[in-house]
Image (spheres, rainbow, N blue to C red):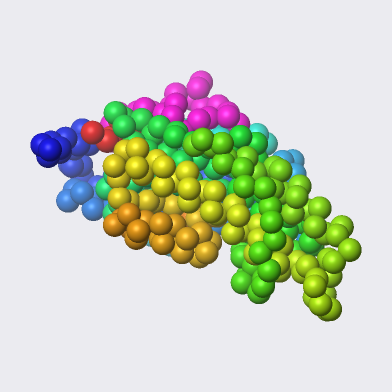
């Protein structure tokens, strides 16, 4: 079989260092990050600051309240990022912001801040797809070359692979995202939202001892998660359910967390393996907030090892929504000549990963 010819990247080495400010606020995390691309092709994370809107146990975050949080904290977070990077806004080459997908009101709040800074300091704007930001930062941090990407977060669940300057979606959720599924069950059993419901589900699952039957709903390359959530919630009304874990032949909240995780993650591993077989890749890159989950990384690692491959993942600094990933994807676009005119610096709650022209990759 003839070897593949490695295509030359259309992204040229910069003639001078480029610096970008990235602003992220598509959900309950407000992030500002500053990144530098140097003349030798290296990338430096100069600062990565984040503040999270945390609600009381049993409550989710509403768009209006989340947007207010972002407005209240925007100046503090941006000034902190500039201070840690030891740069001023006059030295920034472009201001990158999340165009979508995400929650409407928080997106608009952050876009307004980006527009204001652009006008005040006469800096070009770059609108960034949130999902592409996750992928590009994951590739940069891990060094993965041509991976199958599993993008798992509170609002998105997709299996993605790159081809011909497009991140193509092989499979996705048909209803709710995996992070949303975990967060909603955390509210059912009254887990804390600090630092995040998904993290607390993961910790409770480690104490689970019983794997309960739940619907396994892979549909080709897609998954369905709403029925699994409903079935898991139904166990909380079972006469064997004991919130405090006392007695024999019982079902505990820890058992439910364990069963939910094992079932959902097995489905994600299955569709990711199918995509790997299809494109002939031996690399898996896990991005998005749920990508921090160590059990998901472990299960994916077992599958990849059996195929002679490996798993790439980042820690919570880059997995969870952050400004630096928006700066990275935005600066790549900017270096290829892309800018967002002020008249088109809008936001969209639905902005699919495969709608983006990935001009910086061969």
Residue 311 placement, left or right of 298: left
> Is 259 or 127 nearer to us in this picture?
259
Q: What residue lies at 80% left-to-right and 73% top-to-bottom?
A: 249
> Is 342 or 347 nearer to us in this picture?
347
Residue 106 placement, left or right of 345: right
Region rendered in magenta: 330-357
Q: What residue lies at 74% left-to-right and 54% top-to-bottom?
A: 232
Task: Give the total of numbered labels.
Answer: 0
Q: What residue lies at 85% left-to-right and 66% top-to-bottom?
A: 240
Up-down: is 272 above or below 57?
A: above
Residue 161: name its quadrant. Answer: top left
- x%, y% of residue 317? 47, 60
Up-down: is 171 above or below 314?
A: above
Would residue 261 be visible to someone looking at this image? yes
> Is 115 or 99 nearer to us in this picture?
99
> Outermost residue, left direction?
2
- x%, y% of residue 37? 28, 48
- x%, y% of residue 89? 42, 47
> Is 79 or 168 nearer to us in this picture?
168
Residue 266 placement, left or right of 126: right
> Outermost residue, right direction?
239
């Amino acid at each position: 079989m003839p070897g593949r010819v490695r295509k030359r990247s259309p992204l040229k080495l910069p003639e001078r260092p480029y610096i970008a400010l990235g602003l992220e606020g598509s959900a309950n995390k407000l992030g500002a990050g500053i990144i530098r691309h140097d003349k030798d092709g290296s990338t430096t994370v100069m600062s990565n600051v984040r503040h999270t809107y945390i609600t009381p146990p049993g409550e989710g975050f509403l768009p209006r309240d989340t947007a207010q949080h972002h407005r209240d904290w925007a100046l503090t977070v941006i000034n902190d990022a500039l201070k840690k990077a030891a740069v001023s806004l006059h030295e920034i080459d472009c201001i990158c912001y999340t165009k979508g997908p995400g929650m409407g009101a928080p997106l608009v709040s952050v876009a307004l801040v980006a527009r204001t800074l652009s006008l005040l300091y006469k800096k070009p704007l770059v609108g960034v797809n949130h999902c592409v930001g996750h992928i590009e930062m994951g590739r940069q941090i891990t060094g993965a070359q041509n991976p199958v990407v599993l993008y798992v977060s509170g609002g998105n669940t997709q299996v993605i692979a790159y081809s011909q300057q497009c991140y193509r979606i092989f499979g996705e959720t048909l209803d709710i995202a995996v992070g949303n599924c975990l967060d909603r069950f955390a509210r059912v059993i009254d887990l804390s939202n600090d630092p995040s419901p998904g993290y607390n589900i993961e910790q409770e699952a480690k104490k689970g001892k019983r794997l309960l039957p739940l619907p396994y709903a892979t549909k080709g390359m897609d998954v369905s998660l709403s029925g699994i959530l409903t079935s898991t919630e139904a166990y909380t009304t079972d006469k064997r359910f004991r919130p405090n874990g006392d007695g024999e032949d019982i079902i505990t909240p820890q058992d439910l967390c364990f069963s939910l995780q094992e079932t959902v993650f097995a489905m994600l591993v299955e569709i990711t393996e199918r995509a790997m077989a299809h494109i002939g890749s031996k690399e898996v890159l896990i991005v998005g907030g749920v990508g921090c989950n160590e059990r998901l990384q472990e299960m994916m690692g077992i599958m990849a090892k059996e195929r002679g491959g490996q798993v790439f993942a980042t820690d919570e600094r880059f997995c969870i929504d952050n400004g630096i990933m928006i700066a990275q994807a935005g600066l790549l676009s900017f270096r290829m000549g892309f800018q967002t005119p002020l008249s088109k610096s809008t936001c969209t709650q639905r902005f699919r990963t495969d709608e983006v022209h990935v001009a910086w990759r061969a």
